Amino acid sequence: MADGTRRAIVACLADGPQAVGELAAGLPVSRSAVSQHLKILKDAGLVEDVAAGTRRIYRLNPVALAALRDQLDTYWQRALAGYADAVGAPDKPDKET
């Protein structure tokens, strides 16, 4: 997901399943480049494809995306906690007894 083109492909597929040609038409890269990026996304399990005649239709894999989101949420929670520690987030006020 580090590549901008792959993120753009994922964004396009979020609108629904598409063939390589449809994806390439909306992106500033060739069909060949889109195919290469789709192979990487497929190898990572983030997209799935199905044959439709002579074309392959790609769609997002919601299970894999949910797992990726869980990982990213964990990462960001740790990163934000570390940032709060680094900038000296104020301590909670003491309760009066």
Image: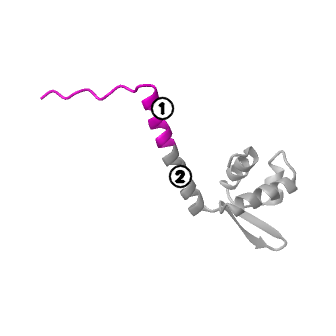
Relative vertical location of residue 65 with respect to residue 92 in this rendering, above or below: below
The range drawn in magenta is 76-97
| Residue in the picture at 74% in, 58% down | 40
- The amino acid beneath tag 1 is Tyr
Packing grade of label 1 (10 A; few <14, some 14-19, many >=20) is: few
In this figure, what is the number of numbered marks? 2
- Secondary structure category for the residue under label 2: helix
Residue 83's disc number: 1
| Residue in the picture at 68% in, 58% down | 16
Residue linked to disc 2: 71
Q: Is residue 95 left or right of residue 82?
A: left
Q: Quadrant of residue 49?
A: bottom right
Q: Quadrant of the C terminus?
A: top left
Residue 83 is covered by the magenta coloring: yes
- Secondary structure category for the residue under label 1: helix
| Residue in the picture at 71% in, 63% down | 43
- The amino acid beneath tag 2 is Gln
Q: Position of residue 9 (x, y in %)?
A: 73, 52
Question: Quick one: which residue is furthest to the left in this view?
Answer: 97
